[in-house]
Amino acid sequence: MELRSALSEYLLHLRIERGLAASTLESYERDLERYAAFLEGASKRAVGEVVPDDISAFQQSLFKAGEAPTTVKRRLSAIKGFHRFCLSEGFAAKNPTAPISVPNTPDRLPDVISIEEACRLLDSIYEVEPAKVRDRAMLEVLYGCGLRASEVCGLDVQDVFLEEGFLRVFGKGSKERLVPLSGTALTAMKDYLGSARAQISLRATSPDADSLKAVFLNQRGRRITRQGLHKIVGAAGKAIGISGLHPHTLRHSFATHMLSGGADLRVIQEILGHSDISTTQIYTHVDRQHLVEEYLSAHPRAAKR
């Protein structure tokens, strides 16, 4: 089968049958587009013409281009999935990636902020201007509920249950889960949905159907984007002296602080929407590292040799 046709079929499979999110699909498409361009440069037009040496050559080209091991690993994983699909669908007689191993990458502990920093961040936004009420609600939900940036942006009004105290969240692969909403996060959401959202929505000159159902709106009254959320979080962090603050840092901090407070790992896994608890276990390493740092700074003989 022609390479480009096979790629189209695979992306269609990921979107319809596996239900991947649009952002994930875009990542797959970028990785596979680069791979396809490399193969075409080597005069490989059909998926059945690809051999293991082609995969190895592409891998080496990535390293020569200075790409990080984690990026190379991601691209190769996408390629392996593509060729497994081609084999299963009969587009090719062999899987050229079978003898190719994905490079190991060192475990990287997630970035977190301290509980004190989280409190300072959230308490720093106290203005009653509608956009600031919205900003506080988004930050409270990121830290108080452990949501991904895409999940915050994707919230619809019908997914917020203020009286019952939970959010209905659609995560990776459109998997649905219920997340507790309480404390200051619940208060912030009530403040925002009470009047601020309606005031912001008035700025939309021609609101579309998506804007009408979206929880968080931008200054034009449209559903807020991940880029917009990133800017708001980054600016809020910078205002209190935290540079490069990212929405995912608040999600990581939520999980780490929950674990430090005695929450069961299975509960954290369910709230975060991890399908495998091994993904959640990274936070035990973060918590353990925090304990070591506290010990070294507090014990009178810890630093002595």
Image (tube, helix red, strand yellow):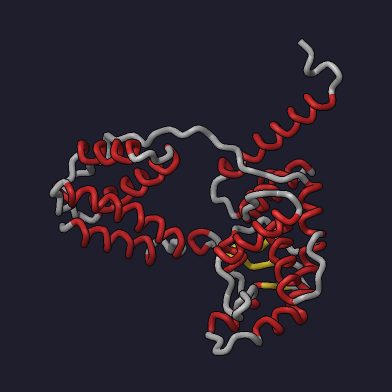
Q: Is residue 158 left or right of residue 115?
A: left
User: Is residue 34 visible to us here?
Assistant: yes
Q: Residue furthest top?
A: 305
Residue for point 40% across, 60% down: 25
Residue for point 60% across, 60% down: 230
Residue for point 74% across, 65% down: 136
Q: Is residue 75 above or below residue 135?
A: above
Q: Residue furthest bottom?
A: 206
Q: Nearer the viewer, residue 133 or 158?
A: 133
Q: Is residue 210 above or below residue 124?
A: below
User: Is residue 270 visible to us here?
Assistant: no
Q: Is residue 282 above or below residue 209?
A: above
Where does residue 186 sit, x and y in percent of width and height?
78, 67
Quadrant housing the N terminus: bottom left
Q: How many marks?
A: 0
Q: Nearer the viewer, residue 296 or 274?
A: 296
Q: Is residue 36 left or right of residue 278?
A: left
Where does residue 23 sit, x and y in percent of width and height?
46, 61
Q: Residue furthest right?
A: 300
Where does residue 101 sit, x and y in percent of width and height?
34, 34
Where does residue 60 sit, x and y in percent of width and height?
29, 36
Quadrant housing the C terminus: top right
